[in-house]
Image (cartoon, rainbow, N blue to C red):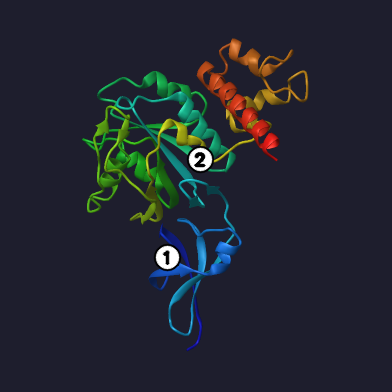
Amino acid sequence: MEKKFFEGVITKAVGGNYTVVTTDGVLTCNARGIFRKNKISPSAGDNVIVTTEENNIPLISEIKERKNYIIRPPIANLDMALIVSSAVDPAPNTLITDKLISIFESKGIEPVIILTKTDLENCDSFAEIYRSCGFEVIYMDNVTGEGIEIIKKKIKGRTSALIGNSGVGKSSLMNILFPDLKTDTGDISKKLGRGRHTTRQVEFYALPDGGYIADTPGFSTVEVSKYGFIPKDELQYSFREFEEYLSGCQFRDCVHLKEKGCLITKAVEEGKIQISRYESYKRMYDEADKLNEWEFKSK
């Protein structure tokens, strides 16, 4: 039997089984062993080549070059990350939000913030922090559906993923986008501050007007770093509001902490850079510095 070739995108990856959408239909595939040997795993979002062997079993034979990749959950080729936060249960956290934004910015993924449960608590001050930095912030009411049209317009024709803590309303949002999906939603465990019966894996769903969107497993505070790591010397470039000041610091190796002639710290003092964003930068720099030191000592 003649070998056949199909080009497609992985929409779901579970335990070595891959769902690949091609122009010829949907295929359920395994992957060639060469990927395991090269320590590469096909992931949701990957553009791949599928071949059929003599036994007509489809196998992923090639993973095309990725434009970006998130370590955990493993997702490739995102255009946009919809960072979902809730006004209460759990309350929004600037450090978590800033870590996620920085990771996505460093990978060329557009971050968009979605705020849910705003009928229960005012989130305007939180929203203003990010709007003042040039990020889009969308209020979404998962009960009335208010805000969904703005989101639909934003994600049209693009590959996006919902990212956020458990219990913020990601699955509820998916149910509004796809009424027949019936994704499980869970109450918040008061003890753990996490949702129950929530998404366990990444799966992309085709949007009616083109593009894909995926829900992702919720996370706790300590798991945010698994999305990616930014070296301390590169961290300054993932805070977009720093850009206009970076070339003006007195010293070329300024890390914007306590150095003389630093324009970043001056801008913070003058209210031109949000204090919470700068505090996140300092915290992230310290964490990256300690990790670099640990990696050095472990070699």
Sequence-wise first label, 1 or 2: 1
Quarter of the rendering containing residue 58: bottom left
* x 25%, y 39%: residue: 186
297 or 53, which is in the foreground?
297
Point out the frontmost of discs 1 and 2.
2
Q: Residue furthest top?
A: 269
Inspect the image, locate mark 1, and give the three-letter code of the amino acid beneath it.
Answer: Val
226 or 67, which is in the foreground?
226
* x 73%, y 20%: residue: 249
Dot 1 corresponds to which residue? 20
Dot 2 corresponds to which residue? 226
Residue 184 coordinates in the image, percent (x, y): 25, 46
Secondary structure of the residue carrying tag 1 is: strand
Asked if 173 appears above or below 254 in the picture, the reply is below
Gap between marks 1 and 2, in whole Å?
Answer: 26 Å
Residue 146 coordinates in the image, percent (x, y): 27, 35
Inspect the image, locate mark 2, and give the three-letter code of the amino acid beneath it.
Answer: Lys
Asked if 67 appears above or below 100 in the picture, the reply is below
- Left or right of 22 in this view: 166: left
Quarter of the rendering containing residue 286: top right
Secondary structure of the residue carrying tag 2 is: helix
Residue 22 coordinates in the image, percent (x, y): 43, 68
* x 35%, y 22%: residue: 123
Q: Label 2 neighbourhood size at 10 Å, few (<14), some (14-19), many (20+)?
A: few
